[in-house]
Image (cartoon, rainbow, N blue to C red):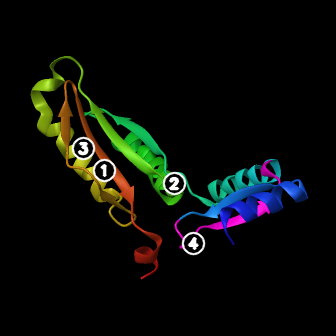
Amino acid sequence: MPIREALELAKKEGLDLIEVGSSANPPVCKLTEYGRFRYHKTKKEKESRKAQHQVKVKEIKLKPNIDVHDFQTKAKKARSILEKGHKVRLTCIFRGREILHIDLGEKVLQQFAEELKDIANPEAALKRMGRTLVTVLAPIAAAKKKA
C-alpha cells in the first residue's frame, strides 16, 4: 500500500508505522507501538549475546630457568584454561643478565607448546618485546579434537 495510506491508517489506529525490512522491494513496514518494538528488539539482542562464547586471553608467565615441577604446574593450569576454550599467552620474562641467553627462554616456550600440542596450536610465532618473549596458544577446534 502507498506510504500515505499506511501513515493515515497508523494515525487512525493510534500506532506507529515502523519500517522492518528496508532491503526488501518494496520496503516492509509494520503497525505497532514504537516503545514495544524497541523493547522486543533489545530483548532479542540480549538473548543472542548470551548465546555467544567470549574467548578470553589468559596469561601465564615463565622464567628461562624454571624448575621442572613449576613448569608442570603451569602446564597443567594452561591445559585447564585451553579446555575451557580460552587462549593462553605465554610470556617469558628475562631479569638482569638472563637477557643474554634468549635461547633458554625460546627453549622453555617451545617445550611448553610441545607439552600442550594435543589440545593447542601456537597462534603466533615467538616475538621479543624488550625483556620479554611472547607467544599465544589457541585451543584446537572441538571438531578436530573429536576426529
Query: Does the magenta segment cover residue 128?
Result: no
Is 75 left or right of 14, judged from the image as shown?
left
Which mark, by number, is residue 80? 2
Q: Which residue is mark 4?
A: 26
- Return the x and y of residue 51 as percentages of the image width and height: 64, 60
Q: Which residue is mark 3?
A: 108
The amino acid sitting under disc 4 is Pro
Residue drawn at 70 percent across, 60 percent down? 4
Query: Does the magenta segment cover residue 31?
Result: yes
Residue 32 visible at all: no
Q: CA distance from mark 2 to mark 1?
A: 14 Å
Is 61 left or right of 8, judged from the image as shown?
left
Residue drawn at 34 percent across, 44 percent down? 68
The amino acid sitting under disc 2 is Ser
Crowd rating for badge 3 (residues with CA inside 10 Å; few <14, some 14–19, many 20+): some
Q: CA distance from mark 1 to mark 4?
A: 59 Å
Q: CA distance from mark 3 to mark 4?
A: 63 Å
Q: Which comes before the other along the chain, label 3 or label 4?
A: 4
- Return the x and y of residue 93 as percentages of the image width and height: 28, 29
Q: Which comes before the other along the chain, label 3 or label 2?
A: 2
Circle 2 or circle 4, nearest the eye: 4
Residue drawn at 42 percent across, 39 percent down? 59
Residue 63 visible at all: yes
Circle 1 or circle 4, nearest the eye: 4
Q: CA distance from mark 2 to mark 4?
A: 53 Å
Q: Which residues are magenta?
A: 23-34
Disc 2, SS: helix
Q: Determine whether label 1 and label 3 are within 8 Å by CB.
A: yes
The amino acid sitting under disc 1 is Phe
